[in-house]
Structures are given as C-alpha cells and as structure tokens.
Image (cartoon, rainbow, N blue to C red):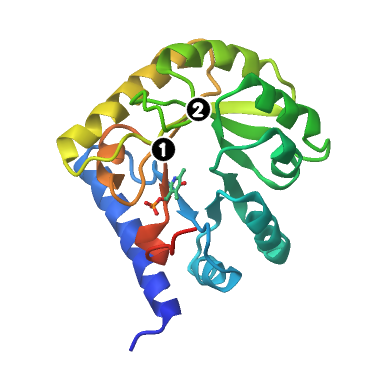
Amino acid sequence: MPTESHMIAAALSKVCQDISHSEARHSRTAGSVHLIAVSKTKSVEQIVVAIDTGQRDFGENYIDEALEKIAKLGHYNCCWHFIGDIQSNKTRHVAAHFDWAHCIGRQKIAQRLSQQRPPHLPPLNICIQVNIDEEASKSGVLASEAPALAGKIAKLPNLCLRGLMAIPSPSDHFDSQRKPFTRMHTLLKSMQYTHPSMDTLSMGMSADLEAAIAEGTTMVRIGTAIFSARSTK
Ligand SMILES: *Cc1c(COP(=O)(O)O)cnc(C)c1O
C-alpha cells in the first residue's frame, strides 16, 4: 500500500505534468501557468509533503484554520493565497498573514485590507472576483462592474491590483468550460490598458484545469487533484 505521503507527492507531480502538457498543447509559454495548491481542510503534515516536493504556493479559504497552519509553517517561506470570501471582521488577519487575496468584490473590504496591511510588508496582491456566469449563489462583481472597482482599488496605497479571479458554473464539457474563461481573458485585456499591473487570471480548478489553460489563465487553484477529496465542511 502506498502511504498517503506518496500519494500526495505523486498526485502533485501529475498535476504539474498536466499543466506542462496543457501549456504545450495550447501554445502557452512553458512555465506561464502558476500552481496554487488548495490546502483548505488539509493538515499541516499533508502540506509539508507538498512543500517537500517543492510546492510553495498554497490557497486557504477558512481564516482560523489558515492562521494556525501559517503559524506552524512560517519557517518554510511559503506564499499564502486567501481564496475565500472575506468578512469585514476578518480583514485584519488576511492583511497581516497573506500575500494574495483572490476574492475581492467590494470596495469596503479592499479599503480595510489596505488600511490594515502592516507597514513592514509589501503591498497585498489583489484579484477582483468576477461573477462571470452571473449566478445568484456566487460572490463577485458583474463583468460590467469590474472596471469601476479596479479604479478604486488601484488608488489604495497598500494593495497591488494584480488581476481577475472567477469560478464559472460547473460543466463537464471542455468547449462549454472554455466560454466563461474566454470572457474573463477578454475582460482582463480590456482592463490592462488602464491598469498595467493587472497580469493575473486566477481561474481553473481540478475539473476545468485544461480549459482554463487554453484560455489564458496564469494561476490555477487545485485542491482535490493533489490532496484527494475533502470531507464536507
Ligand atoms: C476549494 C477551491 C478550489 C479548489 O477546488 P478543487 O476542485 O478541489 O481543485 C479552488 N478555488 C476556490 C476558490 C476554492 O474554494
């Protein structure tokens, strides 16, 4: 029986290979797609297995759980991405302990993050979450609202506006998976004229990784394909 550590290491290496193959297949520059290992609900020990294989970027959704892990893994020099909704009363923790916040949909949250970013840290990297399929259940701004929010975030001194993030509605078909990602790519390109710091598309998860790579993603957020299924929380 392979141990759980072996399984995580093998799965991570397979995901990295899948990313390289998709880059090649869709004429993307090798190494242009960055992997965030989504470690929500997973243990410090499981994260250390991924760190030992060279992975350094991790995504977390639940702040209390994340703070505990970041404290225990502080000496590894990881890059921490907050990929959940941020309540106003949690902004201080995200500002103090994370390198990126991917799900920004409100000016008020951005303002608090900027105010609360400790002065010794570089600006917090920000992606605006776009509700690309206009689903009632999803957070984020409509595509048409993204430019106005970007204008406001760009003025905040302790944030760096890096790009756009989306979670499209699930689909099993490659061609339908590509459509919302194409719209995201077009939106990013239209905003880069005004905001040259926007170099990031945070899109693509375990089930739609290749479609996201085909459509220009620069950061994929992968949990299940690395750490196996999560028990429901
Ligand atoms: C959980 C989560 C992921 C990872 O999803 P998988 O399907 O497990 O790869 C990616 N992005 C966000 C925002 C998530 O909440």
| Residue 163: numbered disc | 2
Relative horizontal placement of residue 198, taking residue 222 as reference (left or right): right
* Picture coordinates of residue 104, whole percent (x, y): 57, 29
Please identify the quarter of the rendering in which residue 217 is found: top left
Q: Quadrant of residue 186?
A: top left
Q: Residue at x 64, y 55 (%)?
A: 66
Asked whether 143 or 11 is in front, the reply is 143
Residue 80 versus residue 148: which sits nearer the camera? 148
Asked if 233 appears above or below 46 in the picture, the reply is above
Q: Is residue 84 left or right of residue 214?
A: right
Q: State the residue position of label 1.
A: 218
The three-letter amino acid code for the residue at tag 2 is Gly
Circle 1/circle 2 CB separation < 8 Å: yes
- Which quadrant of the rendered structure holds the N terminus? bottom left
In depth, the one of 25 and 186 nearer the eye is: 186
Which residue is at a point 55% across and 42% down the rendered structure image?
84
